[in-house]
């Protein structure tokens, strides 16, 4: 209970800041719908960037397990760098999805409240139907995005494990021990890419709906 009391003012402050931001943007002609479109498109780009980064990490992993002499410390540093970049890419994807959620809920709440302002019953019904349809499409998109987000976690865990193991075992024997991990990581990354492609495709459809 104490934790709730401590965090509640912070949550209220964040909500107030978001409301102020939306109000300021509306004054210059940028509405919540426009912001949502921008954030969905930014999330698309973030997911595409993450796909490329995880592919790069897989290529580095492939180079690692084929190591046949040279500077193993340098190979470890390159492997660790790829893991850190993947971690940052995953964090950015999560941040983008969270930003979509924030403005989407604000948009739907506003849309719902404004239904009571109609005097024309037909227009009100049409708007309510469009709201319900858009919300369903959004919920499906969000679920797909979250699935793609979660598919990054097993890859990150594997990359971290491999990097940590190599850090403390810089020898050919360690390389041999990691060779068996490659197929599993490759499978997880392929699943991740497929999930993200699905999310990106749904995003494009959702943006097209919002622009109608």
Image: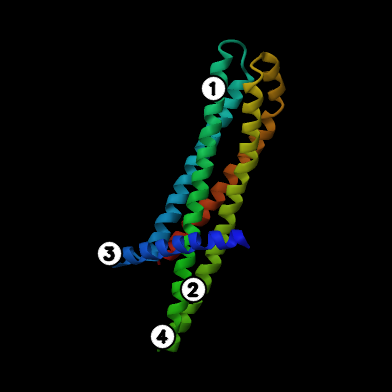
Could you give the CA–CA distance between mark 3 and mark 4, rounded to whole angstroms?
Answer: 25 Å
Q: Which mark is residue 28?
A: 3
Mark 3, mark 2: which one is toward the viewer? 3
Q: Mark 1: which secondary structure? A: helix
Q: Which residue is mark 4?
A: 118
Quarter residue 188 falls in: top right
Residue marked by disc 1: 77
Label 4, secondary structure: give it. Answer: loop
Q: Are marks 3 and 4 in contact (CB under 8 Å)?
A: no
User: How far across and how far down the image is residue 114, in percent?
Assistant: 42, 79
| 95 vs 210, nearest the viewer | 95
Is 135 placed above or below 144 here? Answer: below
First in residue order: circle 3 vs circle 4: 3
What number is the disc on residue 164? none
- Per the model, the C-alpha gap separating discs 2 and 1 is 51 Å
Q: For the N terminus, which image quadrant?
A: bottom right
**Few, some or many C-alpha atoms within 10 Å of disc 4 (few <14, some 14-19, many ≥20)?**
few
Spatial separation of the CA atoms under disc 4 and disc 1: 62 Å
Element marked by disc 3: loop
Q: Is tag 3's residue or tag 2's residue first in the polypeptide sequence? A: 3
Specify whether residue 103 is in view. no
Q: Nearer the viewer, mark 2 or mark 1?
A: 1
Q: What number is the disc on residue 131?
A: 2
Upstream in the sequence, badge 4 or badge 1?
1
Cα separation, mark 2 vs mark 4, equals 14 Å
Q: Is label 2 in contact with label 4 (beta carbons under 8 Å)?
A: no
């Amino acid at each position: 209970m104490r934790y709730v009391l401590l965090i509640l003012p912070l949550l209220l402050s964040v909500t107030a800041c978001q409301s102020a931001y939306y109000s300021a943007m509306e004054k210059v002609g940028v509405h919540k719908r426009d912001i949502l479109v921008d954030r969905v498109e930014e999330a698309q780009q973030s997911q595409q960037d993450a796909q490329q980064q995880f592919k790069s990490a897989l290529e580095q992993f492939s180079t690692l397990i084929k190591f046949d002499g040279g500077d193993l410390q340098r190979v470890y540093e390159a492997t660790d760098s790829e893991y850190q970049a993947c971690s940052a890419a995953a964090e950015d994807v999560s941040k983008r999805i969270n930003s979509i959620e924030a403005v989407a809920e604000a948009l739907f709440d506003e849309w719902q409240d404004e239904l009571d302002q109609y005097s024309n019953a037909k227009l009100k019904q049409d708007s309510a139907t469009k709201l319900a349809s858009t919300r369903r499409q959004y919920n499906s998109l969000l679920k797909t995005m979250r699935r793609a987000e979660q598919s990054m976690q097993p890859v990150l865990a594997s990359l971290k494990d491999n990097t940590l193991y190599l850090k403390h075992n810089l020898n050919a024997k360690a390389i041999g021990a990691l060779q068996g991990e490659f197929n599993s990581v490759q499978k997880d990354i392929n699943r991740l890419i497929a999930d993200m492609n699905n999310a990106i495709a749904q995003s494009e459809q959702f943006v097209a709906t919002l622009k109608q």
